[in-house]
Amino acid sequence: MNFQVNEVRQWIELTNEKIQRNKEYLTELDQAIGDGDHGINMARGFQEVVNKTSSSEYTSVSDILKDVAMTLMSKVGGASGPLYGTAFLKMSMALKDKDVVDYNSLVLAIDQALQGIIQRGKANEREKTLVDVWAPVVKFLQDRTTFHADKLIQVAEKAMDDTKDLMAIKGRAAYLKERSIGHLDPGSVSSYYLFQSLGEAIKGGS
């Protein structure tokens, strides 16, 4: 498994491509149960991240992840900026001083990201938030010893689809109560794009 600066750069670029391509779709999902700005915010934030990381030099995975975190926190509005920014900052901290990022280090970093999201968002599983994608992905990774890109993508996609049947407990969608059932959670969809891109980036670098 390769997870170095180039893989992180590719991960972010692939995520940005998916978000830009699905910006209106993410906005439609958020218009149904949220503020209606998830697509716009994520598209602006990840484009800024790519602008920053593609024009900068990095000597460690931790450094580029920290730049991703700081850019998302400063450029993405609503709840998404702090949540995604915290996730990348936690990953950066977990991988600080790591010259080589092996599988166990990557899994630990993603778990730390999940813990950061839970702490920041005060959300738990099955409350129709992005935790409902991150938590099954972390469990899947922890149950294995090597990276399986295709299976990771499948797990993330199923977890995203499962949010459709959940009733929202957190955020603006919670005001809709039962009426939130039947809609995908926008944050879970953007998280799926993130893990789909991670799988593609590492697979390409292996």
Image (spheres, rainbow, N blue to C red):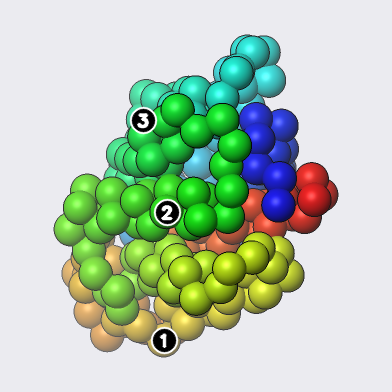
Disc 3, SS = helix
Residue 161 at x, y = what percent? 53, 79
Marks 2 and 3, how far apart at CA: 22 Å
Residue that numbered label 3 is attached to: 73
Res. 16 visible in picture: no
Residue at (65% x, 63% y) in the render = 147
Disc 2, SS = helix
Marks 3 and 1, how far apart at CA: 30 Å
Residue that numbered label 2 is attached to: 108
Name the image quarter holding residue 108: bottom left
Name the image quarter holding residue 66: top left
Residue 47 at x, y = what percent? 60, 30
Residue at (71% x, 45% y) in the render = 2
Marks 2 and 1, how far apart at CA: 29 Å
Residue at (69% x, 68% y) in the render = 148
Residue 160 at x, y = what percent? 51, 72
Q: Amino acid at mark 3?
A: Met
Residue at (36% x, 65% y) in the render = 131
Q: Amino acid at mark 2?
A: Leu
**In the image, farthest residue toward the top:** 56
Residue 154 at x, y = what percent? 65, 75
In the rendered image of this protein, does residue 192 appear above or below residue 197? Answer: below
Q: Nearer the viewer, residue 3 or 194?
A: 3
Q: Is residue 204 left or right of residue 180?
A: right
The answer to whether mark 3 and mark 1 are in CB contact below 8 A is no
Of marks 2 and 1, the one in the foreground: 2
In the rendered image of this protein, does residue 57 appear above or below residue 71? Answer: above
